[in-house]
Image: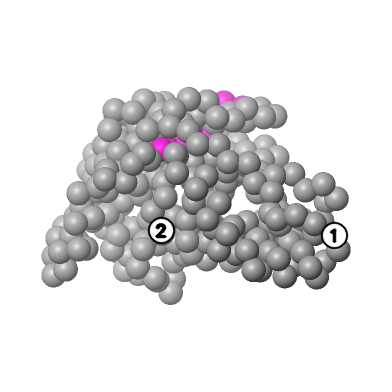
Amino acid sequence: MIEVTLLGTGSPIPDARRAGPSTLVRAGDQTFLVDCGRGVLMRTAALGVGANAISALLLTHLHSDHIADLGDVLISRWVSNFAPNQPPLPIIGPPGTAEVVENTLKAFGPDIGYRIAHHADLTAPPPVEVEEVTDGVVWGRDGVAITVAPTDHRPVAPTIGFRIEHNGASVVLAGDTVPCPTLDALAAGAGALVHTVIRKDLVDAMPMQRIRDICDYHSTVEQAADTAARAGVGILILTHYVPPIAPGQEDDWRALAATVFDRQIEIGEDLHRVEVHPGVCARQG
């Protein structure tokens, strides 16, 4: 079984009810953080998951809303891990990730220096192990395999999606993208597809061209559902709602997806959880 929790279902626009884009995936004894938008560790804390419990950080792309709390993840994991030889945090992302991580640690340089000076058991900066990828198998430990494929969020490039598999269960996390053949192939036959979505009809009605521009490189609810249908996935899990879903409007969004996808559709607030089983998928609230 793989457990998917929507940590943050928000967008670049701050929202009092929704944290920034982030998803937690638990497979066996391993815990993967996919993207790290604003407020991510507050959401993991609500689940009883600390930064030091993260097996790896997976980044779909380097837009600010998807990495806003990278520094918090790096520093919090470092100071809350009391192992004498703290292992590095694996960070898997597209080309450019290493530079972003390096510069984030530089930005927190004074803080890191203060903590090393104050705590005798902290003798080095936060250990990280960055792997930049665009395609192929990137993880294979204790029965969990992770595969990466390119997505299409141009002019943001490169961007990637992840497929996590464990004991016959599989979950694909698309990140921000328009429909593309590489995502179709990555998601083929998966138990669940976690997909970011926009409502083009609502965005087009906004007076600001800069906001309307986002329609160029995000999937609509219907397009995400069509990707799920083409790939033959069992559950479509929608997240990163733009504009934010107004209270009581979840059924409207679900109905749009249902026009092209006739299986299980999940839409929820932050901390919405879905269990994905091999062949049998059940919602857990």
Question: Who is closer to the viewer here, 48 or 128?
Answer: 128
Count the marks: how many? 2
- Tell whether position 268 is magenta: no
Element at label 2:
helix
Question: Who is closer to the viewer here, 4 or 86?
Answer: 86
Give the residue type that dot 1 points to. Asp
Element at label 1:
loop
* Colour option used: one colour
Relative to residue 174, is residue 31 drawn left or right?
right
Relative to residue 50, is residue 240 drawn left or right?
left
Which residue in the protein does label 2 denote?
Answer: 64
Separation of residues labelled 1 and 2 (CA atoms): 33 Å
Snapshot quadrant of residue 177: top left
Question: Who is closer to the viewer here, 249 or 3?
Answer: 3
- Tell whether position 166 is magenta: yes
* Magenta residue span: 160-169
Give the residue type that dot 2 points to. Ser
Q: Position of residue 239 (x, y in %)?
A: 39, 53
Residue drawn at x 85%, y 50% is 84
Which residue in the protein does label 1 denote?
Answer: 121
Q: Please determine whether, in this image, residue 140 is positioned above or below residue 78.
A: above
Q: Position of residue 198 (x, y in %)?
A: 27, 54
Q: Position of residue 28 (x, y in %)?
A: 67, 37
